[in-house]
Image (cartoon, rainbow, N blue to C red):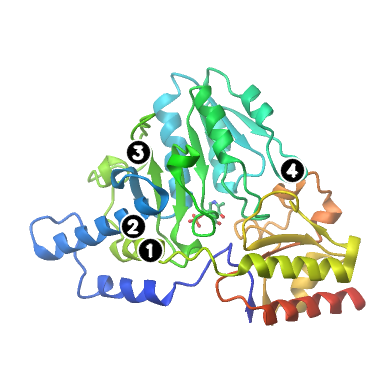
Amino acid sequence: MIYLDYNSTTPVAEEVLQYMLPYFSNKFGNAASSTHLPGLEAKQAVEDARISIAKQIQAETQEIIFTSGSTEAINLGIKGVYNLYYNKGNHIVTVATEHKAVLDTCKFLEKKGAKVTYLEVDHNGLISLEELEEAITDKTILVSVMFANNETGVIQDIKSIADIVHKKQSILFCDATQAIGKVKVDVQASGIDILCMSGHKIYGPKGVGALYVRRKNPRVTLEPLIHGGGHERGLRSGTLNVPGIVGLGRAFEIFDFNTGTEQLIHYFEETLLQLLGSSIQIHGKAAERLPNTTNISFPFKAVDFIRHTKSKLAIATGSACTSAENLPSHVLTAMGIDKSQSEKAIRFSLGRDTSKEELNTVIELIMGLCDNP
Ligand code: PLP
């Protein structure tokens, strides 16, 4: 099976797994039990993970809050700001191409009285900085823009976005779930105030992630969603998932930004362009993109290709969260791509183990369907 769906999830890296294993058995302590050694040992392991994560993104350790993944971190970040600041202002600005975890959270808050502006994107998936600036009012308590899109890999100009958000005295939430581990994410250099991340996108375990919450310049405060026990500085109660957190920390220590996927993506796209020319469309091609992601419309329907190749190939049309809905991608639609092109779009997301031989096999499969539709 050729797996090209690494934006959906990654395997746990062997060194991450080995690091986690003792915390399921002989090192089983509860990180909140401070009266005995097993508990203290677990707490130390959690704090070591917090240090590894903070170091990678240039944060302070107290600014990292462990969660069950990005979806929870997004809910905590967005609802946490809204619940605390809605008296100051009830306006949120986000982008039409955000992940459903952000869009559905905003939709939920709309029912509670929030006003949400959904910024449009251009043909390459990028927002307009002028439109962003115009959209922010003195009632805007939060701006939410993702670092890199999960379907197209398109990277927004987060530094410029943060400058505008701060000039207008608002707060920037950034969904960096797909960017972390693939490109350098630095909360100081880019001016991000709240950021979410997830273990299973970066060769760590599923069901664990974290939220970065800035403590100074500006200090960001949130209202917790889960109460009881006061874990994680009162922001996220509940016994900590020590093996998961240890795995997340280890995954952050073994980042490798030079896995060669960028060259492979280039090879893949160029070969397909040579073979199929203008009958294919690479979405977001002119924008800066993640080094592992390409989203291409072919002269055939994506569902037909997936059906034809199911036994050999693991790929997706877009986000795993919406793949069951069978609707045109909201990301491609927002980029102005019509329904018929959108139905022909396939996302290829490469990983550390992807080889040129595998891509050649995929190219053959694509050409096979072009010749015999
Ligand atoms: N945000 C983006 C951009 C994603 O790609 C995903 C994963 O699909 C999520 C959020 C949700 O992450 P998690 O699976 O950790 O809840």
Amino acid type shown at disc 2 = Ser
Which of pointers 2 and 4 lies earlier in the amino acid sequence?
2
Label 2 element class:
helix
The numbered disc on residue 224 is 3
Q: Are marks 4 and 3 in contact (CB under 8 Å)?
A: no
- The amino acid on which the numbered mark 4 sits, given as a three-letter code, is Ala
Q: CA distance from mark 2 to mark 4?
A: 37 Å
In the image, residue 291 above or below residue 133 = below
Q: Amino acid at mark 3?
A: Pro
Is label 1 in contact with label 2 (beta carbons under 8 Å)?
Answer: yes
Viewer-proximal residue among 262 and 334: 262
Q: Residue furthest left?
A: 35
**Tag 3: Cα neighbours inside 10 Å, few (<14), some, or many (≥20)?**
many
Residue 99 in the image: above or below residue 355: above
Separation of marks 2 and 3 at Cα, in angstroms: 24 Å
- Residue 202: percent from left, percent from top: 48, 63
Lower position in the chain sequence, tag 2 or tag 3: 2
The foreground one among 264 and 373 is 264
Q: State which mark lies toward you, 3 or 1.
A: 1
Residue that carries the numbered disc 4 in the rendered image: 334
- Location of mark 1 (residue): 253
Q: Dot 1 lies on which element? A: helix
Foreground residue among 240 and 265: 265
Give, as a three-letter code, the residue at label 1: Glu
Image quadrant for the N terminus?
A: bottom right
Distance of label 4 from label 1 (alpha carbons): 36 Å
Q: Position of residue 266 (x, y in %)?
A: 72, 65
Q: Which residue is mark 2?
A: 52
Neighbourhood count class around disc 4 (C-alpha, 10 Å): few under 14, some 14–19, many 20 upward? some
